[in-house]
Amino acid sequence: MKKLIIVVAISMLSITKSFANNEVKGPEQTLRNEIATLLKSPEFTVENELMAKIEFTVNNKGEIVVLTVDADDSIVESFVKARLNYKKVDTELKPSSKIFKVDLRIKKDA
């Protein structure tokens, strides 16, 4: 029974992930990929998995402007702001005041 619960949980996670991936298309997916690249390889040791919710916008110069970083660890907040704030992105977006939300998960070092 325990194995069945684990299999069901993994299946639900996979289904949820595929639906989430279908929501983001075009320039927003490209922007998401650029964000992922900018946040690769943190320069600090990760003991446990770290999570953060990031809200940002892109100004008319094509720069990321971090609005909020909701994280339990202040080092994650500093890391995100240092890596993203006012970094130019190549993704061409229509000028708007849209606020983007991204969930960040930093996994434990191998």
Image (cartoon, rainbow, N blue to C red):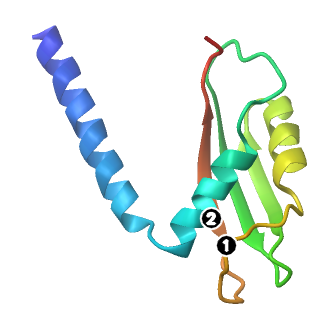
Residue at 80 percent across and 66 percent down: it is 64
Q: Residues within 10 Å of mark 2 (few under 14, many from 20)?
A: many
Q: Is residue 10 left or right of residue 83?
A: left
Residue lying farthest to the front in this orientation: 90
Question: Which sits in the foreground, 106 or 93?
Answer: 93
Q: Is residue 30 left or right of residue 94?
A: left
Residue at 67 percent across and 72 percent down: it is 91
Residue at 74 percent across and 31 percent down: it is 41
SS under mark 2: helix
Q: Position of residue 90 (x, y in %)?
A: 72, 70
Q: Quadrant of the N terminus?
A: top left
In space, the residues marked 1 and 2 are separated at their CA atoms by 6 Å
Q: Is residue 3 above or below residue 89?
A: above
Residue 22: quadrant of the picture: bottom left
Q: Quadrant of the C terminus?
A: top right
Q: Is residue 26 above or below residue 106?
A: below
Mark 1 / mark 2, whichever is N-terminal: 2
Q: Disc 2 marks which residue?
A: 31
Q: Residues within 10 Å of mark 1 (few under 14, many from 20)?
A: some
Residue 25: quadrant of the picture: bottom left
Q: Which amino acid type is shown beneath numbered disc 2?
A: Leu
Q: Position of residue 50 (x, y in %)?
A: 65, 28
Q: Position of residue 81 (x, y in %)?
A: 86, 49
Q: Position of residue 62 (x, y in %)?
A: 80, 76
Question: Which sits in the foreground, 95 or 33?
Answer: 33
Q: Which mark is residue 23?
A: none
Question: Which sits in the foreground, 3 or 22?
Answer: 22
Q: Are marks 1 and 2 in contact (CB under 8 Å)?
A: yes
Q: Disc 1 marks which residue?
A: 91
SS under mark 1: loop
- Count the marks: 2
Q: Is residue 8 left or right of residue 57?
A: left
